[in-house]
Amino acid sequence: MKRFLVGKWARCAGGAAGGVMLWFATGCTTFEESGLPGSASSMARNQIMPVRAEPESFGHYRLASLMRIYPDLDLFVAKRGMPDFLAETSNSRQHYYILYYLKDRQAFAARTRAPHRKRLEFAGPYPITDKERKTLEQLKGDQAATPSAPRGFHQQLRLF
């Protein structure tokens, strides 16, 4: 019996040590921004998401989270208004965000500025092509036609 309990304790201690190592490996960030499977940042990777407040879409939730992380993005959205769509992708060095404004037929790009990971560099406006506009309007129409879909996590389009 004693051997069994010692074995259980070793497994528990090993699991706790693994959890602590994982916490340090993610840079002490929140789970949502860790990039781990199931986190908001991993679900948003390489996605284009509609931004809708009511009912709240995943894109709206994600944009609100990003605005808390990046004060530059918060100021940009305060000035330009909420975009209709948010696209997100990244590589090993930088994160990239594209904000689409359908009414103005414009898109703005933002990327993290190395080495300042909490600052964004903006570019644009870029004109939205007819093909992009048609695809985004179709996606927006699909959103309106399916109000009973799971809240916030439906109809995402792969970006890359």
Image (spheres, rainbow, N blue to C red):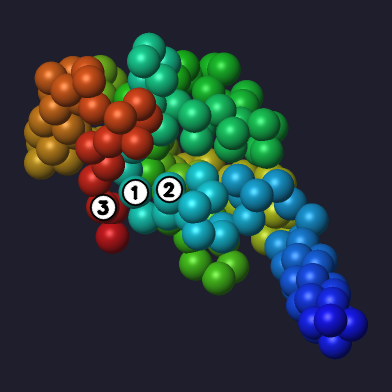
Picture coordinates of residue 30 (x, y %)? 70, 47
Rendered position, 137 above or below 47? above
- Residue drawn where x is 84% and y is 81% of the image: 1
- Residue drawn where x is 60% and y is 46% of the image: 32
| Quadrant of the image occupied by residue 70 | top right
Q: How many marks?
A: 3
Marks 2 and 1 sit apart, C-alpha to C-alpha, by 5 Å
The reply to whether the C-beta atoms of the residues labelled 1 and 3 are less than 8 Å apart is yes
Query: The residue tagged with tag 3: helix, strand or loop?
Result: strand
The reply to whether the C-beta atoms of the residues labelled 2 and 1 are less than 8 Å apart is yes
Query: Which callout, 1 or 3, points at the residue further toward the start of the chain?
Result: 1
- Residue drawn where x is 85% and y is 87% of the image: 3
Note whether residue 50 is visible: no
Is disc 3 surrounded by few (<14), some (14 to 19) or many (20+) residues within 10 Å?
Answer: few
- Check residue 47 in the rendering and tell me which mark sits there, or answer none: 1
Going by the numbered disc 2, the residue's amino acid type is: Ala
Query: The residue tagged with tag 2: helix, strand or loop?
Result: helix
- Residue drawn where x is 10% and y is 41% of the image: 131
Tag 3 residue:
158
Marks 3 and 2 sit apart, C-alpha to C-alpha, by 10 Å
Q: Is residue 114 left or right of residue 46?
A: right
Tag 2 residue:
44
Note whether residue 90 is visible: yes
Going by the numbered disc 1, the residue's amino acid type is: Gln
Going by the numbered disc 3, the residue's amino acid type is: Arg
Q: Is residue 68 left or right of residue 1?
A: left
Marks 1 and 3 sit apart, C-alpha to C-alpha, by 5 Å
**Residue lying farthest to the top in this orientation:** 54
Rendered position, 133 above or below 40? above
The reply to whether the C-beta atoms of the residues labelled 3 and 2 are less than 8 Å apart is no
